[in-house]
Amino acid sequence: MPKRAVITEVYLQPSGYYFGGPNTRVRTLLGSCVSIVLWHPDAHLGGMCHFMLPTRGQPTDKPDGRYGDEAMSLLCDAIRLSGTSPSDYQGRLFGGGQMFPELAHPRRQHVGQHNVAMARRLLAERNIGCHGEHVGGIGHRNLIFDIWSGQIALKQSLPLNASGLRAGQQSQ
């Protein structure tokens, strides 16, 4: 009987990133934050970053994964160390949800929208094709990425209001 591979589970906190090979599952929980997921279909390598803000807007010697541009740089550095090129990967984007719709200003973008715009720009700047996205809307997302297959499992949940009900739900 063949031996089953041991699967390594990695949970990404906000500002985290991970890059690795097969037998790895990466999980995260996203609200207005965004995850960029990169997968190499031939080498079965992949990675994910989880950033909170698009950019800090000033140069620094120490990259910080809280910012989209810096998180992507960290992830791409890890890719290059593997001997592959970021442009050989398939990109996907997740997150950028509106967590407090009752506080939204009708003519201003919320932070999630800014994060999504940055993620799209980062993929385009590195010539990484976007092979799918699940972004915007209201609420948070549970995201699971299986590096061995490139498969994504996703569940989106609506936020609770002050009464403890989900958006659109009524008390009985």
Image (spheres, helix red, strand yellow):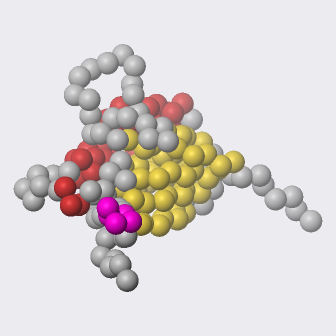
- Residue lying at 32% horizontally and 18% vertically, measured from the top left: 60
- Residue lying at 60% horizontally and 42% vertically, measured from the top left: 20
Left-right relation of 148 to 84: right
Q: Is residue 63 magenta?
A: no
Q: Nearer the viewer, residue 149 or 146?
A: 146
User: In the rendered view, would you say 19 is above or below 29?
Assistant: above
View extreme (bottom): residue: 172
- Residue lying at 37% horizontally and 35% vertically, measured from the top left: 66
View extreme (top): residue: 61
- Residue lying at 51% horizontally and 33% vertically, measured from the top left: 78
Residue 145 placement: quadrant: bottom right
Left-right relation of 124 to 31: left
* Rendered location of residue 2, percent (x, y): 88, 62
User: In the rendered view, would you say 55 is above or below 49?
Assistant: above
Q: How many marks?
A: 0
View extreme (left): residue: 107
Which region of the structure is painted magenta? 160-164
Q: Is residue 163 magenta?
A: yes
Q: Quadrant of the N terminus?
A: bottom right
* Rendered location of residue 170, percent (x, y): 33, 79
Left-right relation of 16 to 64: right
Q: Main secondary structure of the magenta part?
A: loop
Q: Quadrant of the C terminus?
A: bottom left
* Rendered location of residue 118, percent (x, y): 26, 45
Q: Is residue 126 visible?
A: no
Q: Is residue 92 visible?
A: yes
* Rendered location of residue 108, percent (x, y): 11, 52
